């Protein structure tokens, strides 16, 4: 399910109320667009919740007055039934609509997860690879999930404020006959408590922002300890104590944050408790005097006491709700950016490609590149043309710029300088999805998913059983899969399936190669495709790939220079520049860097025989 994303087009100003309203308005906009029932149930639940307190405030007065007056059993029964029945109906309706709200919120949450995942998948690659993105994501989640209270709780706070305001207005009508100075004193004391709460909430926000990095590190250590991916290294290298010490340092730092937060909470609550003490003292002294002076009856006494307590509670909830939403404003800034990460690849007037065409030529013209926030260039003044059907090997020592060259070609990053062309069209002007369809890629750090073998190869594309088994055989996986009880339907890993299997490095690489073959794109890129294979398997693999890439353009990145003999041209990278370019025979005649690397590997191979 793809959910269309719309940005709310009004600016965030340096005004707390505007920011606060924008955060609420964003959630209201999202809820209205994807699940209007949620808003309706939420508002009805808040209304029911706001009216129920009046039953406990008003009806006991009449019951007590009747008990201290005429004591009519039939009237008392009516009052008691109204009191009990009203509470039952009010609480039942509140519970029902809150339950319906929760059910609709779960539906809304699922839609939001799809919305969020769609947004992240389309975000420019350099955004999600940065440390800044990870920090921002954690802060954004504090807004989306109410700083640990659950999804969209800021909207819950907003509707609760509306409900509590209704309660406050009703109670004000009830206590309007009380001494005006008493009412003013109550309001001042409530404002005092709210002020203390706002100070605490601000400090809590500041601490939360500071502990984001620590929590992320804490989560990382937990993943290290729990994940089977790291289990072998941890045990073989006896990392237990070392990891535990590092983990303990992180937990200690977290504990310091919680200690400070707890201290601030205790100070705030003691101050609020003192305010409540003064508040109740004023109310009870005034009302007791009224009873002793016969200006207030016992029924009225209980009603006013209950009303004042409810007024205090409701006003505090209103103020705390505002403080809570106000506190979220900085979270919202992060969330707003997080949900609207740059998607430059999808912008501009882009040209759709003719998908029937396969004769593509690629050209780099004076391309240089430096990674974000780094001044040193990884590639410098790269100019090369890759013709249709050509087999190109890219070689060089570690850090020479080979993988970065491929990242630019695949538009995972954009050049800092220069341009890249596809058939004389700047690749920035080509529709991004169309452009990526041209490539089948096996990355050096390829990823396998906890799905079936079949799904790992087809990756959601239409299934052609004949081609699927053909490419499984060509990649060298047939024997392995034939020995599995469930064959291509066997799950990888045991994350979701106890009968799942874990492939070795070489088997995983073969699966990634089968995936690239199955996509059947006109341009094939193999980044260290044989790193986990033995020499015989490597030779067979290249034979197969030469056969199946006969009418395709193929780019090989490899430390093993044996692959270069299969290629038409060889690019030799050194320190981010093209040092040499030509065929194997041409470069060997030059007796340069390529010859040195080739002879060095040949000598190493002889020594191992």
Image: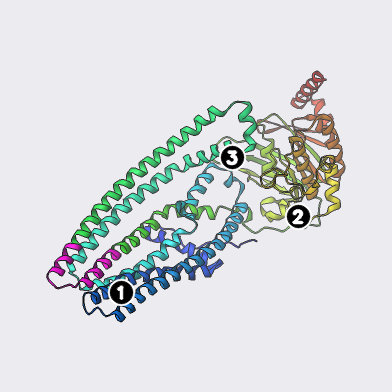
- Is 170 situated above or below 275? below
- Is 4 situated above or below 342? below
Task: Read off the residue under disc 1.
Answer: 59
Which residue is found at the position 53% from the left and 27% from the top? 241
Query: In the image, which residues are magenta?
Result: 283-311
Q: Earlier in the sequence, mark 1 or mark 2?
A: 1
Q: Earlier in the sequence, mark 1 or mark 3?
A: 1
Q: Is residue 194 left or right of residue 46?
A: left
Which quarter of the figure has residue 221? top right
Figure coloring: rainbow
User: The residue tagged with tag 1: helix, strand or loop?
Assistant: helix
Task: Read off the residue under disc 2.
Answer: 461
Asked whether residue 225 is drawn in magenta, I would say: no
- The answer to whether mark 1 and mark 3 are in CB contact below 8 A is no
Q: Position of residue 361 (x, y in %)?
A: 77, 47
The one nearer the camera, 285 or 172, is 285
- The answer to whether mark 1 and mark 2 are in CB contact below 8 A is no
């Amino acid at each position: 399910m793809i959910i269309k994303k719309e940005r709310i087009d009004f600016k965030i100003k340096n005004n707390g109320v505007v920011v606060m309203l924008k955060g609420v308005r964003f959630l209201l906009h999202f809820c209205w667009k994807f699940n209007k029932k949620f808003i309706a149930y939420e508002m009805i639940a808040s209304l029911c919740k706001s009216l129920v307190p009046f039953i406990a405030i008003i009806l006991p007065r009449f019951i007590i007055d009747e008990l201290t007056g005429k004591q009519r059993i039939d009237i008392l029964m009516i009052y008691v039934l109204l009191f009990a029945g009203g509470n039952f109906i009010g609480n039942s309706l509140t519970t029902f609509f809150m339950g319906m709200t929760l059910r609709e919120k779960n539906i809304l949450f699922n839609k939001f997860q799809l919305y969020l995942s769609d947004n992240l998948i389309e975000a420019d690659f350099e955004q999600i690879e940065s440390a800044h993105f990870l920090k921002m994501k954690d802060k954004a989640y504090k807004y989306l999930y109410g700083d640990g209270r659950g999804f969209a709780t800021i909207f819950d706070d907003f509707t609760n404020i509306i409900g509590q305001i209704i309660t406050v207005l009703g109670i004000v009508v009830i206590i309007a006959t009380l001494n005006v100075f008493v009412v003013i004193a109550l309001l001042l004391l409530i404002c005092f408590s709210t002020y203390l709460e706002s100070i605490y909430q601000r400090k809590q926000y500041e601490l939360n922002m500071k502990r984001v990095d620590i929590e992320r590190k804490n989560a990382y250590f937990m993943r290290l300890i729990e994940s089977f991916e790291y289990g072998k290294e941890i045990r073989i290298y006896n990392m237990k104590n070392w990891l535990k010490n590092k983990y303990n340092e992180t937990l200690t730092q977290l504990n310091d944050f919680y200690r400070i937060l707890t201290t601030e909470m205790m100070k705030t609550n003691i101050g609020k408790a003192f305010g409540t003490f003064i508040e109740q003292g004023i109310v009870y002294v005034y009302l007791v005097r009224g009873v002793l002076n016969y200006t207030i009856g016992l029924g009225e006494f209980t009603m006013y006491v209950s009303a004042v307590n409810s007024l205090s509670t409701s006003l505090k909830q209103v103020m705390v709700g505002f403080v809570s939403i106000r506190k979220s404003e900085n979270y919202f800034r992060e969330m707003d950016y997080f949900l609207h990460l740059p998607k430059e690849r999808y912008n501009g007037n882009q040209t759709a490609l003719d998908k029937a065409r396969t004769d593509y030529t690629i050209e780099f013209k004076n391309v240089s590149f430096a990674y974000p926030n780094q001044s040193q260039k990884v590639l410098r003044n790269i100019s090369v043309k890759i013709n249709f059907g050509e087999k190109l090997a890219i070689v060089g020592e570690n850090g020479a710029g080979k993988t970065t060259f491929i990242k630019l070609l695949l538009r995972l990053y954009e050049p800092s300088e220069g341009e890249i062309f596809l058939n004389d069209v700047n690749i920035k002007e080509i529709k991004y999805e169309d452009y990526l369809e041209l490539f089948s890629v096996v990355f050096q750090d390829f990823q396998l998913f906890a799905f079936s073998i079949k799904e790992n190869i087809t990756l959601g594309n239409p299934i052609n059983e004949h081609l699927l088994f053909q490419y499984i055989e060509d990649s060298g996986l047939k024997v392995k899969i034939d020995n599995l009880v469930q064959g291509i339907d066997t799950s990888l890993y045991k994350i979701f399936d106890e009968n799942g299997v874990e492939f070795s490095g070489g088997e995983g690489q073969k699966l990634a190669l089968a995936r690239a073959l199955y996509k059947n794109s006109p341009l094939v890129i193999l980044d260290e495709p044989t790193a986990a294979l033995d020499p015989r398997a490597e030779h067979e693999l290249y034979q197969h790939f030469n056969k199946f890439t006969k009418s395709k353009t193929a780019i090989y990145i490899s430390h093993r220079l044996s692959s270069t003999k299969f290629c038409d041209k060889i690019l030799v990278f050194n320190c981010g520049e093209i040092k040499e370019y030509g065929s194997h025979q041409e470069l060997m005649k030059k007796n340069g860097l390529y010859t040195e690397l080739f002879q060095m590997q040949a000598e190493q191979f002889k020594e191992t025989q």
